[in-house]
Image: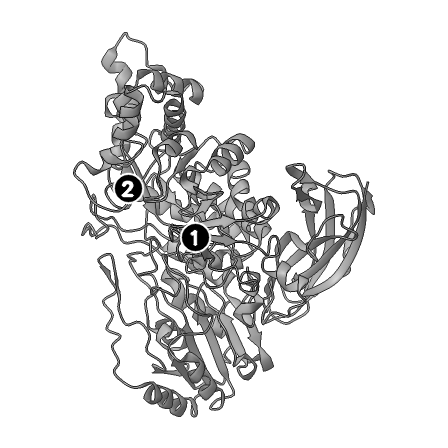
Amino acid sequence: MSSRLILSVLVATFLPLAVQAQKVPAYLDESLPVETRIDDALSRMTLDEKIAVIHAQSKFSSAGIKRLGFPDFWTDDGPHGVRPDVLWDQWEQAGQTNDSCVAFPALTCLAASWNPDMAWIYGGNLGEEALYRDKDMILGPGVNIYRTPLNGRNFEYMGEDPYLASKMVVPYIKGLQSKGVAACVKHYALNNDEEYRNNVNVIVSDRALHEIYLPAFKAAVTEAGTWGIMGSYNLYNNQHNCHNDILLNKILKQDWKYDGVVVSDWGGAHDLDQSIKNGLDMEFGTWTDGLSFGASNAYDNYYLAMPYKRAILEGKYSTKELDDKVRRVLRLFFRTTMNRNKPFGFMCSESHYQAARVIAEDGIVLLQNKGNVLPINLKTVKKVLVVGENAIKMMTVGGGSSSLKVQREVLPLEGLKKRLEGIAEVDYARGYVGDITGEYNGVKTGQNLDDKRSESELIAEAVEKAKTADYVIVFGGLNKSDYQDAEGHDRKHFELPYAQDKLMNALAGANKNLVYVNISGNAVAMPWSKKVPAIVQGWFIGSEAGNALASILVGDANPSGKLPFSWMNSLNEYGAHALGTYPGTWRKDEKIIDEEYKEGIYVGYRWAESKKIKPLFAFGHGLSYTTFKLGKSALNAETATVGDEVTVTVPVTNTGSLDGKEVVQVYVSEVKPTVDRPVKELKGFAKVSLKAGETKDVKIVLKSDSFGFYDEAKGGWTTNKGRYQISIGNASDNITSKNFIELK
């Protein structure tokens, strides 16, 4: 048991004995409603104590209330694992030996599972690791929408569709918070590219804001009850989002009735008055003044520190806003640091590794499999050639705030060698050299990836070895370096780096059993895709990467992942790029860059279908080693009243010879819309496991809001009466049946 937890237990348990005949303070009386306890604690706090709890005291902590027995509050990065501890006021490592963790798959992989059960497992297991490390809040999950494949941080998010992201984020939060650890959903909102993230002022219609960019955040608040929300770096309506009146006060706290805390992104506060009035509750920072440079007594210089206190003492502000912030912080304390009913944490357990592997296997996507090249035939295979730097490069170090220090990371080459031991020879060719560095904030991979051979030499070696192999498995894609899949910058182009296209074209002529495994959190250009029989999207999948990928490649696990975003053929097939709105236009003072989301609600498959673009791989696409048949669907009624739920039933049969999983997807269209609406929108899905030859009836309930749109004139959601089409399929471009219903 941690010292902090012991302290809080002792205070809550024995303080009444210390005061003997005195009455237990209301804030320590667990029989009372929590709001009563908050009122009592607030009444006992001094101005200095109130100020202390609403801003950082170190890189990742804020002060508790020692006089009243409230421990300090500790946050940590960790959408995919609990980040190693850093020094008090530096990003460099603290040098601890007990802060290694399990790396879980990046959230794009989780979203690709289309399986809310996986999200619950993910959150719960991560919460246990956080508990062991005395972390009270995990800074995640992220649910920003995939608008452009250049966004360096897409790997941390849950794809392009607001409904899918909404349904996946809720169980993640509930699983995490069931352990007494707060989620802090990020980055609220409109943080859809990383380049110029501190300067971007997003211009977006109210309709697109509410239909595309806010639903996952809303679900996190109204369905999951998240205890934390992190503001984003960018601006909206010319206000930074860490203190944005519309987003925080009006939408989040007024409309959604949010009772948790709003946490600034690190250094995301820029204005004292706005920080006080516009909904920010806890200010954290990157540099010691919260902005750009160091200072003595640094944390006292934060906007919500001494400047706020001085302004109150000078009569510029009352304590009204302060007391609201402190109430929210106290509510957070009672949910976390003062919760004596939290379970015990543990980390790096085999159960956590198993969870990471199961999630990874459920989210890996089989994009293409011509001639059933996969799975590898274990009865006939004698030699497998593995090619590519990403087969041997650790991917848990780097990428920004999600960088981890893992206890172990099974690499793809290692995983295949282990699985094929005694079955086939596994040879290796480098193929290309990318980023050979292996350090981030003091965490070192310990790998030596230096290779001085030329591009032509590397390709020639791979081709020569490929000629004698039964299978060639290329592990390519992106990595966690700057300007790839990493925080702080966007990719500079859609194409694969490090001459990988040359490598793939050369290998395509050398071996007919060529498999490409793309390691990334983003779509990439694949001009050679028609030449390559099998393509797998392998994501960044953490500690068990090698084992999970090997399991899929040899058929121990049947792939069942589906793409959470549209994989276009070229960059100009994405709306943001087709319309020339990315990255935006700099103002004359070159301090703000305005980025207009001209595509509006037409993001991802919505854009592709409106422009009749055939993606390389469609949203919701993903193959299996078995085959499925979706039978004729049916609705529970032909007519319904606006506001009623509608149940869709479809029989699903596994028509192949292997057990597997299929994802039934339900899309809704208004037949004769009164406003511009997408061709169809995802409004329901279900993942079903089927044994070979088995049939199950899958029922999916369309909620009352499944038919609505955001009416800008009314400033709210509206559902029109009329005829709607319900489309059922296993990908956005593979609709197998349709039904119609009349709403009256």
Q: Which residue bears the numbered disc 2? A: 290
Q: Position of residue 31 (x, y in %)?
A: 42, 18
722 with respect to 437 (left or right): right
Camera-nearest residue between 550 and 639 = 639
587 with respect to 69 (left or right): right
Foreground tag (1 vs 2): 1
Residue at image coords 52%, 88%? 512
Give the image quarter of residue 57. Answer: top left
Give the image quarter of residue 390. Answer: bottom left
Residue extending farthest front = 588
Q: Which residue bears the numbered disc 1? A: 587
Relative vertical location of residue 251 with respect to residue 467 in this rendering, above or below: above
Give the image quarter of residue 24. Answer: top left
Camera-nearest residue between 234 and 494 = 234
Determine the CA span between mark 1 and mark 2: 25 Å
**SS at mark 1 in the image:** loop
